């Protein structure tokens, strides 16, 4: 898969269930920065796969890197964020 940055709707992004940062903390300052300057570093995502069924759904993704940026972007009112889609094994 090509390392191309694409805009993905936030509603199509799911937090990784094994993300070591269970609480992203206060993202107010980061949210304000995003409002002023946009997202300066893309998120890294993988195609989403249901833990229950093991099946994926087209256009849905799991966030690997960028959970705080995603939370701050939501708080800032963004509808989409820049992402690189990677293929990775579990």
Image (cartoon, rainbow, N blue to C red):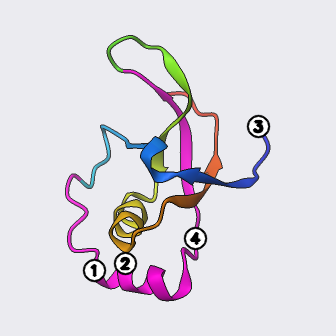
Asked where in the image residue 38 lies, by quadrant, the reply is bottom right
The residues tagged by marks 4 and 1 sit, at their Cα atoms, a distance apart of 17 Å
For label 1, the SS is helix
Disc 1 versus disc 2: distance between alpha carbons? 5 Å
Circle 4: is it few (<14), some (14-19), or many (20+) Cα within 10 Å? few
Mark 2 or mark 4: whose residue is earlier in sequence:
2
Q: Residue 16, image x and y in percent?
A: 37, 41
Kindly indicate whether the residue at mark 1 contacts the one at mark 3 (C-beta within 8 angstroms).
no
Image position, residue 86 (x, y; %): 64, 41
Question: Is 23 on the left-hand or right-hand side of 58?
Answer: left
Q: Secondary structure at mark 2?
A: helix
Q: Is residue 59 above or below residue 77?
A: above
Which residue is outermost to the right? 2
Query: Residue at left 36%, top 69%?
Result: 72
Instruction: Give the residue at x 55% y 60%.
Output: 81
Q: Earlier in the sequence, mark 3 or mark 1?
A: 3
Asked if the residue under mark 1 is in contact with the one under mark 4, i.e. CB atoms within 8 Å, the reply is no
Circle 3 residues within 10 Å: few <14, some 14–19, many ≥20: few
- Is 6 on the left-hand or right-hand side of 16? right
Residue wearing tag 3 = 1
């Amino acid at each position: 898969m090509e390392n191309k940055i694409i805009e993905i709707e936030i509603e199509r992004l799911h937090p990784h269930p094994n993300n070591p940062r269970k609480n992203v903390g206060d993202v107010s300052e980061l949210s304000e920065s995003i409002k002023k300057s946009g997202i300066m570093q893309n998120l890294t995502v993988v195609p989403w796969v249901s833990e229950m069924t093991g099946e994926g759904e087209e256009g849905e993704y799991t966030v690997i890197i960028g959970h705080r940026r995603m939370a701050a972007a939501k708080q800032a009112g963004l509808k989409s964020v820049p992402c690189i889609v990677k293929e990775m094994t579990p």
